[in-house]
Amino acid sequence: SLYGQLSGAKGKLGFVAGLRLEHFDRDVVIAQPDESFNLNKLNLFPSFNLSYDLGRGLMAKMGYSRRIERTTTFKMTPFPEREHSETLEQGDAELLPEYIDLIEAGLVKSWDDNSLFVTGYYRHVDNVINRVNTVFNDTILNRIYTNVGVARAIGMELGGTFYPAKRWKVYFGGNIFN
């Protein structure tokens, strides 16, 4: 992969923009039966962040990023495996990676060493990997990992960092989303 980043400021406005070019070539080779599954991808992952100083310790921010989440080998192993007496698990050698687009906007209030923040976000995920359950027989569930489509989340995160005493740092955070 190659990555470039540009950052700067103009008055009260700050910015960071980045672009990552990534190539990956994944081979899943099965010995018995003799099969091979190849995934060859070239992707661009842009990101940018803007911040604006509103004065009096208040900062507005917004950003966008595109990321990739690759699956584990376990989820690509296409052989049924006994998870426990009631469940068989099986992967998919042709699983696609998840692609995540994230848009955020928020405010940060700082004073002394303390800070509070609130951030709203929207997340869109393509090629979501989920477990799909089917009945193997009357007492055993067959669980298969597969790409199931698109997922979306919209939410808000709230948090803060405080220093109530000389050697104490308190952080709290919460997230509400749908």
Image (tube, rainbow, N blue to C red):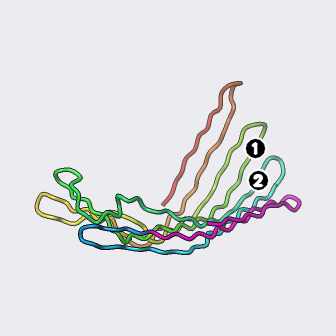
- Res. 57 mark: none
Residue lying at the far right in this picture: please name it: 11
Is 54 situated left or right of 157 in this image?
right
Marks 2 & 1, CB-CB < 8 Å contact: yes
Q: Mark 1 is on which residue type? A: Ser
Q: Residue at horizontal 71%, vertical 62%?
A: 49
- Residue labelled with disc 1: 110
Is 41 situated left or right of 95 in this image?
right
Viewer-closest of 37 and 64: 37
Please count the marks in the image.
2
Q: Position of residue 62 (x, y in %)?
A: 70, 62
- Label 2 environment density (alpha carbons within 10 Å; few <14, some 14–19, many ≥20): some
- Label 1 environment density (alpha carbons within 10 Å; few <14, some 14–19, many ≥20): some
Q: Position of residue 178 (x, y in %)?
A: 48, 61
Q: Mark 2 is on which residue type? A: Met
Q: Hey, which quadrant is residue 104 in on the image?
A: bottom right
Is residue 24 on the magenta stretch?
yes
Residue range highlighted in magenta: 1-26
Viewer-closest of 105 and 72: 72
Q: Residue at horizontal 34%, vertical 73%?
A: 36
- 22 is higher (above) or lower (below) than 56: below
- Residue labelled with disc 2: 59
Is tag 2's residue or tag 1's residue first in the polypeptide sequence?
2
Tell me the element at label 2. strand
Determine the main secondary structure of the stretch shown in magenta. strand
Tell me the element at label 1. strand
Is residue 36 on the magenta stretch?
no
Q: CA distance from mark 2 to mark 1?
A: 8 Å
Q: Position of residue 130 (x, y in %)?
A: 36, 64
